[in-house]
Image: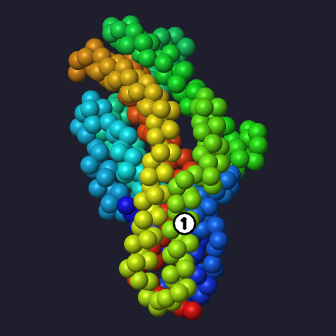
Amino acid sequence: MRKISLVIAVLFSVLTTGCLTTDGMGPVPILEEVDFAKNLGGNVVSDYEDSDRFFPTSFDSESAEYKALVMEHTYGSYEEAYENLLLLPELSDLDTREEMAYFINYICESCIEAVQNTESHEELETARERNNEAMMNNAIRASKDSSFTPEFIIDPNAEKYNEAVNKITPMYSEEWALMSDLLTYFDGRDDDEVAWLINVRNGGFPRFLFDDFMPLIKKICREWYTSDACQQVQAIEDELMERVRRERPVAVPQWFVDERKREAEIVAEYNRQILSLFLKFVEPQLEKKKAQISLMIDADTRVDEIWNNGDYTKEYLAAKYATFGGVEAFFHMYYELLAIMGDVPLIRTPPTYEGLEFIY
Protein backbone atom coordinates (compact mmCIF):
# COMPACT_ATOMS: atom_id res chain seq x y z
CA MET A 1 0.00 0.00 0.00
CA ARG A 2 1.16 3.53 -0.73
CA LYS A 3 2.29 5.35 2.41
CA ILE A 4 -0.04 7.93 3.87
CA SER A 5 1.31 11.46 3.88
CA LEU A 6 2.31 12.97 7.20
CA VAL A 7 -0.12 15.85 6.70
CA ILE A 8 -3.12 13.52 6.55
CA ALA A 9 -1.68 11.46 9.37
CA VAL A 10 -1.43 14.49 11.66
CA LEU A 11 -4.92 15.64 10.77
CA PHE A 12 -6.68 12.37 11.38
CA SER A 13 -4.79 10.44 14.02
CA VAL A 14 -3.81 11.01 17.62
CA LEU A 15 -1.50 9.23 19.97
CA THR A 16 -1.26 10.85 23.38
CA THR A 17 -0.75 14.26 24.92
CA GLY A 18 2.56 15.67 23.74
CA CYS A 19 3.93 15.95 20.23
CA LEU A 20 6.05 14.32 17.57
CA THR A 21 9.11 15.71 15.88
CA THR A 22 9.50 15.50 12.12
CA ASP A 23 12.54 16.25 10.03
CA GLY A 24 12.32 19.77 8.69
CA MET A 25 8.84 20.38 10.08
CA GLY A 26 9.52 20.92 13.77
CA PRO A 27 7.28 19.59 16.54
CA VAL A 28 3.77 18.54 15.59
CA PRO A 29 1.24 18.65 18.46
CA ILE A 30 -0.86 15.52 18.89
CA LEU A 31 -3.95 15.60 21.11
CA GLU A 32 -5.45 12.58 22.77
CA GLU A 33 -8.64 11.52 21.05
CA VAL A 34 -11.29 9.22 22.47
CA ASP A 35 -13.03 8.58 19.15
CA PHE A 36 -9.93 7.68 17.16
CA ALA A 37 -11.62 4.94 15.11
CA LYS A 38 -14.75 6.94 14.41
CA ASN A 39 -12.72 9.84 13.09
CA LEU A 40 -11.08 7.61 10.52
CA GLY A 41 -14.49 7.62 8.86
CA GLY A 42 -17.64 9.41 9.90
CA ASN A 43 -21.40 9.46 10.11
CA VAL A 44 -22.25 11.93 7.31
CA VAL A 45 -20.61 12.86 4.02
CA SER A 46 -18.84 15.92 5.42
CA ASP A 47 -17.06 13.76 8.02
CA TYR A 48 -15.18 12.02 5.21
CA GLU A 49 -13.90 15.22 3.65
CA ASP A 50 -10.47 16.62 4.29
CA SER A 51 -8.11 18.95 2.48
CA ASP A 52 -7.92 16.36 -0.29
CA ARG A 53 -11.66 15.63 -0.36
CA PHE A 54 -12.15 11.84 -0.32
CA PHE A 55 -8.61 11.15 -1.46
CA PRO A 56 -5.50 13.08 -2.53
CA THR A 57 -6.32 14.62 -5.90
CA SER A 58 -3.06 16.32 -6.91
CA PHE A 59 -0.66 14.65 -9.30
CA ASP A 60 2.24 15.65 -11.49
CA SER A 61 1.42 15.20 -15.17
CA GLU A 62 4.98 16.26 -15.99
CA SER A 63 6.59 13.60 -13.84
CA ALA A 64 8.64 10.82 -15.39
CA GLU A 65 6.35 8.29 -13.74
CA TYR A 66 3.20 9.70 -15.33
CA LYS A 67 4.80 10.06 -18.76
CA ALA A 68 6.02 6.47 -18.57
CA LEU A 69 2.47 5.32 -17.82
CA VAL A 70 1.17 7.24 -20.85
CA MET A 71 3.76 5.49 -23.02
CA GLU A 72 2.89 2.13 -21.47
CA HIS A 73 -0.80 2.58 -22.30
CA THR A 74 -0.23 3.93 -25.81
CA TYR A 75 -0.88 1.37 -28.53
CA GLY A 76 -0.52 1.29 -32.27
CA SER A 77 -4.22 1.23 -33.11
CA TYR A 78 -7.64 1.61 -31.57
CA GLU A 79 -8.12 -2.12 -31.93
CA GLU A 80 -5.00 -2.79 -29.89
CA ALA A 81 -6.03 -0.21 -27.30
CA TYR A 82 -9.38 -1.97 -27.04
CA GLU A 83 -7.74 -5.36 -26.58
CA ASN A 84 -5.73 -3.85 -23.71
CA LEU A 85 -8.62 -1.89 -22.21
CA LEU A 86 -7.99 -1.19 -18.55
CA LEU A 87 -10.25 -3.31 -16.36
CA LEU A 88 -11.20 -2.96 -12.72
CA PRO A 89 -8.14 -3.81 -10.63
CA GLU A 90 -8.19 -6.12 -7.66
CA LEU A 91 -9.90 -4.49 -4.70
CA SER A 92 -6.75 -5.07 -2.66
CA ASP A 93 -5.09 -2.53 -4.95
CA LEU A 94 -7.72 0.13 -4.17
CA ASP A 95 -8.45 -0.34 -0.49
CA THR A 96 -6.81 2.86 0.78
CA ARG A 97 -7.39 6.46 -0.19
CA GLU A 98 -3.79 6.72 -1.33
CA GLU A 99 -4.04 3.71 -3.64
CA MET A 100 -7.34 4.94 -5.02
CA ALA A 101 -5.83 8.37 -5.70
CA TYR A 102 -2.97 6.78 -7.61
CA PHE A 103 -5.36 4.64 -9.65
CA ILE A 104 -7.58 7.58 -10.60
CA ASN A 105 -4.95 10.27 -11.10
CA TYR A 106 -2.18 8.25 -12.68
CA ILE A 107 -3.63 5.09 -14.17
CA CYS A 108 -7.00 6.32 -15.46
CA GLU A 109 -5.68 9.72 -16.53
CA SER A 110 -2.71 8.20 -18.37
CA CYS A 111 -5.07 5.83 -20.22
CA ILE A 112 -7.25 8.74 -21.35
CA GLU A 113 -4.23 10.66 -22.61
CA ALA A 114 -2.80 7.55 -24.27
CA VAL A 115 -5.98 6.98 -26.29
CA GLN A 116 -5.68 10.47 -27.73
CA ASN A 117 -2.14 9.60 -28.82
CA THR A 118 -3.04 6.21 -30.29
CA GLU A 119 -3.54 7.21 -33.93
CA SER A 120 -2.03 10.28 -35.55
CA HIS A 121 -4.46 12.57 -37.36
CA GLU A 122 -1.91 14.99 -38.78
CA GLU A 123 -2.53 13.91 -42.39
CA LEU A 124 -6.28 14.27 -41.90
CA GLU A 125 -5.87 17.73 -40.41
CA THR A 126 -3.57 18.81 -43.24
CA ALA A 127 -6.03 17.50 -45.82
CA ARG A 128 -8.96 19.22 -44.11
CA GLU A 129 -7.09 22.56 -44.04
CA ARG A 130 -6.23 22.14 -47.72
CA ASN A 131 -9.85 21.36 -48.63
CA ASN A 132 -11.17 24.27 -46.58
CA GLU A 133 -8.73 26.63 -48.28
CA ALA A 134 -9.71 25.37 -51.72
CA MET A 135 -13.42 25.83 -50.94
CA MET A 136 -12.77 29.33 -49.63
CA ASN A 137 -10.80 30.29 -52.75
CA ASN A 138 -13.55 28.88 -54.91
CA ALA A 139 -16.14 30.94 -53.06
CA ILE A 140 -14.03 34.09 -53.47
CA ARG A 141 -13.77 33.52 -57.21
CA ALA A 142 -17.50 32.91 -57.43
CA SER A 143 -18.25 36.15 -55.57
CA LYS A 144 -16.24 38.13 -58.08
CA ASP A 145 -18.03 36.73 -61.13
CA SER A 146 -21.75 36.13 -60.74
CA SER A 147 -21.72 34.06 -63.91
CA PHE A 148 -19.18 31.69 -62.35
CA THR A 149 -20.73 28.43 -61.24
CA PRO A 150 -18.43 26.46 -58.93
CA GLU A 151 -18.19 22.77 -59.57
CA PHE A 152 -18.56 20.63 -56.48
CA ILE A 153 -17.27 17.12 -56.97
CA ILE A 154 -19.31 14.65 -54.96
CA ASP A 155 -17.39 11.64 -53.69
CA PRO A 156 -18.98 8.52 -55.24
CA ASN A 157 -18.63 6.84 -51.84
CA ALA A 158 -20.55 9.56 -50.05
CA GLU A 159 -23.62 7.39 -49.45
CA LYS A 160 -21.53 4.55 -48.08
CA TYR A 161 -19.79 6.94 -45.69
CA ASN A 162 -23.17 8.21 -44.55
CA GLU A 163 -24.40 4.68 -43.90
CA ALA A 164 -21.37 3.93 -41.71
CA VAL A 165 -21.75 7.15 -39.74
CA ASN A 166 -25.53 6.89 -39.41
CA LYS A 167 -25.17 3.53 -37.66
CA ILE A 168 -23.34 5.11 -34.74
CA THR A 169 -24.83 8.61 -34.64
CA PRO A 170 -27.93 7.76 -32.56
CA MET A 171 -25.87 5.83 -30.01
CA TYR A 172 -23.29 8.58 -29.79
CA SER A 173 -25.91 11.31 -29.41
CA GLU A 174 -27.79 9.41 -26.71
CA GLU A 175 -24.73 8.53 -24.64
CA TRP A 176 -23.18 11.95 -24.99
CA ALA A 177 -26.40 13.53 -23.78
CA LEU A 178 -26.46 11.19 -20.76
CA MET A 179 -22.83 11.76 -19.80
CA SER A 180 -22.95 15.53 -20.28
CA ASP A 181 -26.18 16.10 -18.31
CA LEU A 182 -24.54 16.85 -14.99
CA LEU A 183 -25.92 17.57 -11.56
CA THR A 184 -24.30 20.37 -9.55
CA TYR A 185 -24.61 21.32 -5.90
CA PHE A 186 -27.69 23.36 -6.80
CA ASP A 187 -29.42 20.00 -7.34
CA GLY A 188 -28.56 18.64 -3.90
CA ARG A 189 -31.67 17.65 -1.95
CA ASP A 190 -30.09 17.58 1.50
CA ASP A 191 -26.84 18.47 3.27
CA ASP A 192 -25.16 15.18 2.36
CA GLU A 193 -25.90 15.55 -1.33
CA VAL A 194 -24.82 19.20 -1.39
CA ALA A 195 -21.58 18.40 0.45
CA TRP A 196 -20.81 15.51 -1.88
CA LEU A 197 -21.59 17.42 -5.08
CA ILE A 198 -19.52 20.43 -3.99
CA ASN A 199 -16.50 18.88 -2.33
CA VAL A 200 -16.24 15.49 -3.98
CA ARG A 201 -17.50 15.87 -7.51
CA ASN A 202 -17.01 19.63 -7.87
CA GLY A 203 -17.43 19.46 -11.65
CA GLY A 204 -20.78 17.68 -11.51
CA PHE A 205 -22.07 14.12 -11.72
CA PRO A 206 -24.09 12.42 -14.50
CA ARG A 207 -27.77 12.72 -13.68
CA PHE A 208 -28.68 9.25 -14.94
CA LEU A 209 -26.32 7.65 -12.39
CA PHE A 210 -27.10 9.83 -9.41
CA ASP A 211 -30.25 8.20 -8.06
CA ASP A 212 -28.53 4.82 -7.93
CA PHE A 213 -25.18 6.10 -6.72
CA MET A 214 -26.12 8.58 -4.01
CA PRO A 215 -28.09 6.17 -1.77
CA LEU A 216 -25.00 3.96 -1.63
CA ILE A 217 -22.87 6.94 -0.63
CA LYS A 218 -25.23 7.88 2.20
CA LYS A 219 -25.51 4.28 3.37
CA ILE A 220 -21.74 3.85 3.52
CA CYS A 221 -21.19 7.16 5.31
CA ARG A 222 -23.56 6.16 8.09
CA GLU A 223 -22.46 2.57 8.70
CA TRP A 224 -18.88 3.02 9.88
CA TYR A 225 -19.69 4.11 13.45
CA THR A 226 -21.71 0.97 14.18
CA SER A 227 -19.54 -1.46 12.24
CA ASP A 228 -17.57 -4.29 13.82
CA ALA A 229 -14.47 -2.95 12.09
CA CYS A 230 -14.78 0.41 13.84
CA GLN A 231 -15.15 -1.30 17.21
CA GLN A 232 -12.14 -3.53 16.54
CA VAL A 233 -9.93 -0.62 15.57
CA GLN A 234 -10.95 1.37 18.65
CA ALA A 235 -10.27 -1.60 20.94
CA ILE A 236 -6.74 -1.98 19.53
CA GLU A 237 -6.20 1.78 19.80
CA ASP A 238 -7.37 1.91 23.42
CA GLU A 239 -4.85 -0.77 24.39
CA LEU A 240 -2.18 0.97 22.36
CA MET A 241 -2.78 4.31 24.05
CA GLU A 242 -2.67 2.67 27.45
CA ARG A 243 0.71 1.14 26.67
CA VAL A 244 2.03 4.47 25.35
CA ARG A 245 0.96 6.23 28.53
CA ARG A 246 2.44 3.46 30.65
CA GLU A 247 5.79 3.08 28.91
CA ARG A 248 6.19 6.63 27.54
CA PRO A 249 8.60 5.70 24.74
CA VAL A 250 10.68 8.38 23.05
CA ALA A 251 11.04 6.94 19.57
CA VAL A 252 7.93 5.38 18.05
CA PRO A 253 8.53 1.71 18.91
CA GLN A 254 8.01 -1.23 16.61
CA TRP A 255 5.13 -2.51 18.71
CA PHE A 256 3.30 0.76 18.07
CA VAL A 257 3.93 0.46 14.33
CA ASP A 258 2.77 -3.17 14.31
CA GLU A 259 -0.49 -2.38 16.12
CA ARG A 260 -1.26 0.49 13.78
CA LYS A 261 -0.65 -1.88 10.86
CA ARG A 262 -3.17 -4.26 12.41
CA GLU A 263 -5.67 -1.43 12.49
CA ALA A 264 -4.82 -0.54 8.90
CA GLU A 265 -5.56 -4.07 7.71
CA ILE A 266 -8.96 -4.01 9.41
CA VAL A 267 -9.67 -0.68 7.70
CA ALA A 268 -8.48 -2.03 4.34
CA GLU A 269 -10.73 -5.07 4.62
CA TYR A 270 -13.67 -2.83 5.44
CA ASN A 271 -12.85 -0.63 2.44
CA ARG A 272 -12.80 -3.70 0.20
CA GLN A 273 -16.31 -4.53 1.41
CA ILE A 274 -17.39 -0.98 0.59
CA LEU A 275 -15.88 -1.15 -2.88
CA SER A 276 -17.51 -4.50 -3.59
CA LEU A 277 -20.91 -2.80 -3.28
CA PHE A 278 -20.00 -0.56 -6.17
CA LEU A 279 -18.89 -3.36 -8.45
CA LYS A 280 -22.54 -4.30 -8.99
CA PHE A 281 -23.17 -0.67 -9.88
CA VAL A 282 -20.12 0.05 -12.02
CA GLU A 283 -19.51 -3.21 -13.89
CA PRO A 284 -22.73 -3.18 -16.01
CA GLN A 285 -22.02 0.40 -17.05
CA LEU A 286 -18.46 -0.49 -18.01
CA GLU A 287 -19.61 -3.52 -20.02
CA LYS A 288 -22.08 -1.32 -21.90
CA LYS A 289 -19.37 1.22 -22.74
CA LYS A 290 -16.99 -1.56 -23.76
CA ALA A 291 -19.51 -2.87 -26.30
CA GLN A 292 -20.10 0.65 -27.60
CA ILE A 293 -16.38 1.27 -28.07
CA SER A 294 -16.25 -1.86 -30.23
CA LEU A 295 -19.09 -0.58 -32.42
CA MET A 296 -17.33 2.78 -32.79
CA ILE A 297 -14.08 1.10 -33.83
CA ASP A 298 -15.98 -1.02 -36.37
CA ALA A 299 -17.48 2.14 -37.90
CA ASP A 300 -14.07 3.83 -38.04
CA THR A 301 -12.58 0.76 -39.73
CA ARG A 302 -15.47 0.62 -42.20
CA VAL A 303 -14.91 4.23 -43.27
CA ASP A 304 -11.25 3.46 -44.03
CA GLU A 305 -12.23 0.34 -45.95
CA ILE A 306 -14.57 2.41 -48.12
CA TRP A 307 -11.90 5.07 -48.61
CA ASN A 308 -9.26 2.47 -49.56
CA ASN A 309 -6.42 5.02 -49.58
CA GLY A 310 -8.27 7.21 -52.06
CA ASP A 311 -8.57 10.98 -52.20
CA TYR A 312 -9.08 13.12 -49.11
CA THR A 313 -12.51 14.28 -50.14
CA LYS A 314 -14.68 16.38 -47.88
CA GLU A 315 -17.08 13.43 -47.55
CA TYR A 316 -14.34 11.10 -46.37
CA LEU A 317 -12.93 13.68 -43.96
CA ALA A 318 -16.35 14.39 -42.47
CA ALA A 319 -16.99 10.69 -41.94
CA LYS A 320 -13.54 10.04 -40.53
CA TYR A 321 -13.73 12.87 -38.02
CA ALA A 322 -17.10 11.56 -36.88
CA THR A 323 -15.89 8.00 -36.37
CA PHE A 324 -12.49 8.49 -34.77
CA GLY A 325 -13.98 11.26 -32.67
CA GLY A 326 -16.61 8.80 -31.50
CA VAL A 327 -14.00 6.16 -30.70
CA GLU A 328 -11.99 8.52 -28.53
CA ALA A 329 -15.11 9.93 -26.86
CA PHE A 330 -16.29 6.47 -25.83
CA PHE A 331 -12.87 5.48 -24.56
CA HIS A 332 -13.00 8.65 -22.47
CA MET A 333 -16.50 7.84 -21.20
CA TYR A 334 -15.33 4.37 -20.23
CA TYR A 335 -12.45 5.67 -18.13
CA GLU A 336 -14.66 8.36 -16.62
CA LEU A 337 -17.00 5.61 -15.41
CA LEU A 338 -14.06 3.60 -14.11
CA ALA A 339 -12.88 6.65 -12.19
CA ILE A 340 -16.24 6.89 -10.41
CA MET A 341 -14.79 4.35 -7.98
CA GLY A 342 -12.82 7.28 -6.60
CA ASP A 343 -16.03 8.88 -5.35
CA VAL A 344 -16.53 6.12 -2.78
CA PRO A 345 -16.01 7.39 0.80
CA LEU A 346 -13.18 5.15 1.96
CA ILE A 347 -12.07 4.99 5.59
CA ARG A 348 -8.77 6.74 6.30
CA THR A 349 -5.64 4.69 6.91
CA PRO A 350 -4.31 4.81 10.50
CA PRO A 351 -0.78 6.24 10.29
CA THR A 352 2.13 4.40 11.90
CA TYR A 353 4.43 7.40 12.50
CA GLU A 354 7.31 5.03 11.89
CA GLY A 355 10.70 6.66 12.45
CA LEU A 356 9.36 9.62 14.43
CA GLU A 357 9.72 10.51 18.11
CA PHE A 358 7.35 11.28 20.94
CA ILE A 359 7.95 14.42 22.97
CA TYR A 360 6.14 14.71 26.30
Number of numbered discs visible in the structure rendering: 1
| Residue 78 in which image quadrant | top left
Where 315 sits versus 263, above or below?
above
Where 40 sits versus 308, above or below?
below
Circle 1: element type: helix
Q: Is residue 112 visible?
A: yes
> What residue is drawn where x is 48% and y is 18%?
171
Q: Is residue 199 visible?
A: no
Q: Hey, what amino acid is under mark 1? A: Ala
Tell whether 66 sits left or right of 58: left
| Residue 162 in which image quadrant | top left
> What residue is drawn where x is 42% and y is 56%?
99
> What residue is drawn where x is 44% and y is 77%?
256
Residue 125, percent across and down? 37, 34
Compare residues 333 and 3 and report the one nearer the observer: 3
Residue 124, percent across and down? 34, 31
Compare residues 93 and 136 and report the one nearer the observer: 93
Compare residues 155 and 285 and report the one nearer the observer: 285
Residue 340, percent across and down? 51, 42
Quadrant into which the C terminus falls: bottom right
> What residue is drawn where x is 39% and y is 46%?
91
Q: Which residue is mark 1?
A: 235
